[in-house]
Amino acid sequence: MFDNLSEKLDKALHVLKGRGQITEINVAETVKEVRRALLDADVNFKIAKEFTNTVKEKAMGQNVLTNLQPGQLMVKIVKDELTELMGGDAAEIDLTGSPSVILMSGLQGSGKTTFSGKLANYLKNKKTKKPLLVACDVYRPAAIDQLHVVGEQIGVEVYSDRENQDPVSIAKNGVAHAKSIGANVVIIDTAGRLAVDEQMMGEISNIHKAISPQETLFVVDSMTGQDAVNTAKAFNDVLNFDGVILTKLDGDTRGGAAISIKSVVDKPIKFIGTGEKMEAIDVFYPSRMADRILGMGDVVSLVERAQEQFDEEQARKIQKKIAKNRFGFDDFLSQIQQIKKMGNMKDLMGMIPGMGKALKGLDIDDDAFKHIEAIIHSMTPDERSNPSKLNSSRKKRIAMGSGRTIQDVNQLLKQFEQMSKMMKMMQGGGGKKMMQMMQNMR
């Protein structure tokens, strides 16, 4: 996400690198390139102009602080202003009410139904809530089917009434059903259209009046750029919604919607969608997104995702196995499953500072572990527990069973052995030994 914008902003800010002082000339040159980068990212021209004027005003006349070069100072100013432009602080979702009612709105194809499921899954797992999904799209039977499939996938009940063609009635009945089953959050998925029209706006406005939701969220496809911003404004004029959800941020998006939507509708971005999996939902933190846009990574989000998947009981069991030299491929496989749950691989690696540039142009398969998994699954339970038993004939059988080569099997065994040694050293407090090993590998 934002690869093109990140690259162009890096080039723009490169103008000041190595300069001894900030001058009107080099600031003007930098600001001009920053504005061009924002416009290329499909940021509204007026917003881009106001943004760069503010950056220029803050940069001019500032003395370069000790150990801070002009380029670094400009990066800080741009980062602070980007953060402010995208909302400043993260916005909380309102879960007051009994039950809390969340109304989802947006155009057809924006990912509204899928994100309703992601939000239900998020509230169920992160906020320990009991959500109910309500299908109010009476025009597309496939939308009702899709919501039921999503609900089954995440273990959340879905309320629908295929005989009823009145979405207002379905929404009210859905809230009543939630009360009867003890659900404390109701997420209402409404119908979308291919474009904003009077019938659509009238319908969702009637639903809004009938159920008085605590949260009305506008779901928008971030890949549509300024069209997304314009559509958000049209919906906000009718609904006065509470927040925005940006979907498909893992795609080839220029980023204009994320940067300028808050400024246009004066409503915060509350969540972002970063992949197809039900876990691919993140709270939107403007400062973290600004860091990522400027190629600084997002270590905090990376650590948070890792902590979510961290199983303390399993970690203790693995610690004991490492201490007794019994760490096997089944344990290795469980670690891989935890990493996969963290999200899209390229997205995760992009959170590491400096990795954005290194990943440019690389196609990192989201199934990056599938070959390793295939090899491990081709082993017998005994072989997984005792890798030392893998002789040449067994390796040949595993290679054939997994569709890989013997070289691939040998490479995995070598990597597994090195990782086991390193884990053993860390377990035994062998920091010096590990340092020596790393020096010998140079």
Image: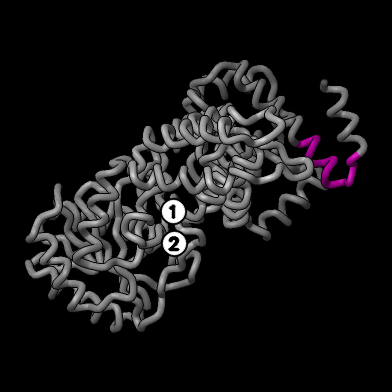
Q: Residue 350 in magenta? A: no
Q: Which residue is mark 2?
A: 122
**Circle number at residue 334:** none
* Mark 2 or 1, nearer chain start: 2
What segment carries the magenta color? 420-431
Q: Residue at x 50, y 65 (%)?
A: 126
The residue nearer to you, when weighing 76 against 66, is: 66
Question: In the image, 137: left or right of 252?
Answer: left
Answer yes or no: is residue 8 visible: yes
Q: Secondary structure at mark 1?
A: strand
Residue neighbourhood size for the residue with mark 2, other residues' Cα within 10 Å, grouped as few (<14), some (14–19), many (≥20): many
Residue neighbourhood size for the residue with mark 1, other residues' Cα within 10 Å, grouped as few (<14), some (14–19), many (≥20): many
Q: Which residue is mark 1?
A: 281
Labelled pair 2, 1 in contact (Cβ < 8 Å): yes
Distance from label 2 to label 1 (Cα)?
A: 7 Å
Q: Is residue 352 above or below residue 145?
A: above
Q: Residue at x 70, y 54 (%)?
A: 315
